[in-house]
């Protein structure tokens, strides 16, 4: 009887030990599982969407006169005063700038209504955030010139061909200037010469009869006895990546940038002579013009007017240069209310 009780006692002890071991194994396994689960569900800052959005704004510029507010702001350290981290990136051509926009290497860029609407229509995720100039002719003294070669008779206009950069703002303003002259653009041969310098040189040498040139090349051509046929006001916008506009922090930074640019414009208007040399150097203004050419500017950056949007879009539609339908609301961001 004693032996039986002893066996039962040992058996119970064995069961208790076994249960303890099973409990320990279960607890350990559960802890490891929880630790693994925690690792999987804890957000990682470097990969979470928006977690590490940089406050730096990379701005793409090309050497056109309209970028002068950026030059003044940099000169006067306005970006630093407003605690803005701005990187100005210069491109030698509009094509290089557009490639940087498409690949996301820049966040904001100076552009024009025609080119920016073509990018948006082609699915590039950008919006027009501001209209720099110009709605009225008095807002500045720069723009686009329809010019005849030196010695040409412009009293009896017979324009059969015009040198432009095709499917760009240059061709758009060429159409509008010809229409204002009572000439049907459909009957004019538009010769594609993308390089501004080449168009200028061929015109001055008399190898082409008419060309459209922006400033400062238009102004320079007039000093070489070329003939002004028509003038079109400046048309310049700023564009920005949509993902930055959808993030409150970067959106506020972009709005601050626009306000800084307006401050820079005010400084320029107050004392244009102070910035003449730095602007001429940065924009490579031809030496012949540096002593005589003075930029006049009388407007602030604002929202793109719907009238300019609609006219630009209608021209693009007529030329079959838009691949999908776009609206003002889709293309324009209302930052400057």
Image (cartoon, grey):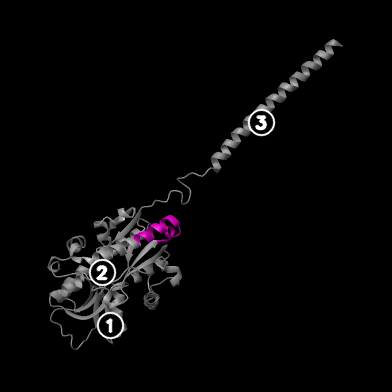
Percent of width and height locating residue 138: 26, 77
Q: Quadrant of the N terminus?
A: top right
Percent of width and height locating residue 13: 75, 18
In the image, farthest residue toward the bottom = 156
Residue that appears at 63% across and 34% down = 30
**Magenta part of the chain:** 241-257
Compare residues 154 and 135 and report the one nearer the observer. 135
Percent of width and height locating residue 246: 45, 59
Residue that appears at 37% across and 71% down = 304
* Front tag of 1 and 2: 1
Secondary structure of residue under mark 3: helix
Residue that appears at 30% across and 82% down = 185
Is there CB contact under 8 Å for labels 3 and 1? no
**Apparent side of residue 188 relative to residue 251 in the rendered image (left or right):** left
Q: CA distance from mark 2 to mark 3?
A: 75 Å
Residue that appears at 41% across and 58% down = 252
Residue on which disc 2 sits:
194
Q: Which mark is residue 26?
A: 3
Magenta span: chief secondary structure? helix
Residue on which disc 1 sits:
178
Percent of width and height locating residue 83: 34, 53
Q: Which mark is residue 250?
A: none
Within the image, what quadrant is residue 318 found in?
A: bottom left
């Amino acid at each position: 009887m004693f032996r039986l009780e002893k066996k039962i006692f040992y058996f119970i002890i064995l069961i208790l030990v076994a249960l303890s071991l099973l409990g320990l194994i279960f607890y350990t396994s559960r802890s490891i599982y929880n630790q693994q689960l925690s690792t999987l569900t804890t957000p990682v800052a470097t990969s979470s969407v928006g977690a590490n959005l940089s406050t730096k704004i990379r701005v793409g510029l090309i050497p056109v006169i309209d970028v002068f507010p950026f030059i003044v702001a940099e000169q006067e350290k306005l970006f630093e005063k407003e605690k803005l981290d701005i990187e100005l990136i210069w491109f030698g051509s509009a094509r290089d700038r557009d490639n940087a926009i498409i690949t996301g290497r820049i966040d904001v860029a100076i552009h024009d209504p025609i080119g920016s609407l073509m990018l948006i229509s082609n699915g590039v995720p950008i919006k027009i955030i501001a209209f720099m100039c110009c709605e009225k002719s008095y807002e500045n003294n720069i723009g686009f010139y329809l010019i005849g070669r030196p010695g040409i008779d412009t009293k009896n206009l017979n324009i059969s061909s015009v040198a432009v950069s095709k499917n760009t703002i240059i061709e758009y303003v060429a159409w509008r200037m010809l229409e204002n002259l009572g000439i049907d653009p459909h009957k004019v041969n538009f010769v594609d010469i993308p390089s501004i310098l080449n168009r200028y040189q061929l015109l001055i040498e008399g190898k082409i009869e008419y060309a459209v040139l922006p400033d400062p090349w238009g102004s320079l051509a007039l000093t070489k006895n070329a003939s002004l046929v028509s003038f079109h006001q400046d048309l310049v916008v700023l564009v920005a990546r949509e993902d930055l506009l959808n993030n409150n922090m970067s959106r506020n930074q972009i709005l601050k940038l626009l306000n800084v640019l307006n401050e820079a414009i005010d400084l320029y208007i107050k004392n244009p002579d102070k910035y003449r040399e730095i602007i001429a150097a940065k924009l490579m203004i031809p030496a012949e013009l540096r002593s005589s050419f003075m930029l006049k500017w009388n407007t602030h950056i604002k929202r793109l007017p719907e009238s300019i949007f609609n006219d630009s879009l209608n021209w693009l539609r007529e030329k079959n240069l838009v691949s999908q339908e776009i609206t003002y609301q889709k293309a324009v961001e209302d930052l400057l209310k």
